[in-house]
Structures are given as structure tokens and as C-alpha cells.
Image (cartoon, grey):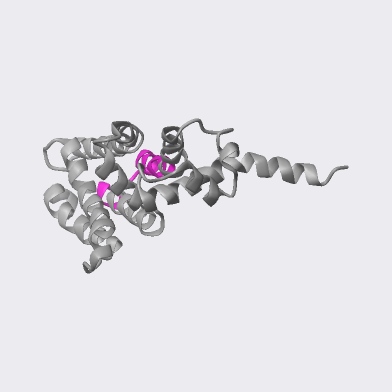
Amino acid sequence: MDVGAPKFRRRKADRPAEIVQAALAVFAEKGFAAAKLEDIARRAGVSKGALYLYFETKEDIFRAVVGQGIAPNVGAVQAMAAAHPGPLADLLRGVTAHLATVVSHTPLGGVLKMVVGESGNFPEIARVWHDELVSPALGAMATAIQAAQARGEVKPGDPRIYALQLISPLLVSILHRETFVPVGAEPFDIPAVIAQHIDTLLCGLLTEGARA
């Protein structure tokens, strides 16, 4: 029995995921235009030739970064919204706390800054980010808010706009951290920002009966 063969097979099967994680870090550090395939291959511990076995272009790698490295967090939000049986306020606190933890402990913020800064030259990365992340996240929250309106918990208003109001401070906090903190700005505690924001938002969002 060749005890080395299973280990080799596992290692080979792991390579695409390792490349994706390496690319996530490289994109966050360097941006899209400046990131080189050599940088990603080196970070992943593979040759450039091996990288081409799995991905043909840098755009393909970015799609994999979004789909495999970031989108599962949106999937978790969708699952939380679909499974939540209780008041909307509890769901919103849970979802935003989850997202704040993710952006506090992963390179996601650097990649978001990259997409905002470079989408003019590389519109495909904005399209992928929107279709895989922004649209599903806003959709899940808008659906949950609409259901809460039907239950009498939330005041009249466009659920999609409410969803944007919910998420926007998180995005602004990320961009502040990635853009201004490196040049000396005082950082914000992102989980604290989001917790205070939710308390403030709920005062205006919920009906009097839901706040009671």
C-alpha cells in the first residue's frame, strides 16, 4: 500500500483553494492591476505553470476569490435570514455582528477598496462583486424587512432602501479603515460602530408596537 498517495491526492485537491486564499491576500495588498500571477503563485507555494492548471487569467482568479473566498459569508447571511423565526431586530443584530466580525478578521476590506478604486478600469470585477455579493446581500435583507413589514414590525418604506441603510455604515467603516487609517487617521472599532448603528436605525425603522 502506498501511504504517500492519499496525501498527494489531498494536497493536489487543496491547491485551488490555496491559490484562492493567496490571491485574496495579494489583491487586498496590491490591488487588481498591480497584482501579478507570480505574486499569487509564490504566496500559494506553487509555480506559475501550476497556477495555469487551475486558472487561465487573473480575472478567473478574482471570480474564484469572490465565489469561494467571500461569497460563503453572504450565503451565511442568506441562511440566517431564511431560518430566523423571531423579531427582525434580533436578525439585524445577528447579521451585522457576523459581517463586522468577518471584515475585522479577514482581508475582505482590502479587496472591497480595490473594487471601488479600480472598477473604472476593470468593470468586470465590479460586475462580479455586485452579482455575487451586493445583490444577494441586499436581496436577503430586503426580503426579511418586507416580511417584517407584513407582520407590522417595520414602518412603511422601500425595503431595498432600508437594506441599503442597514449595510452602508459597514461599507463606510471598511473604506475608512483601508484608506485613511494607513495615513494616520484614528481607527474605528467596526463592531462597535455597527452595534451603535443598529440601535439607532431600529429606533426609526420599527413600529411602536415592535419597539415595545
151 sits left or right of 45 in the view = left
Residue at horizontal 29%, vertical 48%? 113
Q: Is residue 62 above or below residue 169?
A: above
Q: Is residue 78 magenta?
A: yes
Instruction: Work out whether residue 153 can be spotted.
Output: no
Seen from the viewer's position, the closer of residues 160 and 153 is: 160
Instruction: Work out whether residue 109 can be spotted.
Output: yes
**Residue at the limit of the structure toward the right, as seen here:** 1
**Residue 3, horizontal then vertical, whole percent:** 82, 46
Q: Is residue 77 magenta?
A: yes
**Residue 198, horizontal then vertical, whole percent:** 22, 55
Residue at horizontal 14%, vertical 35%? 158
Count numbered badges in the picture. Answer: 0
Residue at horizontal 66%, vertical 40%? 12
Give the main secondary structure of the magenta stretch: helix
Seen from the viewer's position, the closer of residues 184 and 163 is: 184
98 sits left or right of 37 in the view = left
Residue at horizontal 36%, vertical 34%? 132
Residue 203: quadrant of the picture: bottom left
Seen from the viewer's position, the closer of residues 94 and 60 is: 60
**Residue 151, horizontal then vertical, whole percent:** 22, 38
**Residue 115, horizontal then vertical, whole percent:** 30, 42
Residue 2: quadrant of the picture: top right
**Residue numbers of the magenta segment:** 71-90
Q: Quadrant of the C terminus?
A: bottom left
Q: Quadrant of the N terminus?
A: top right
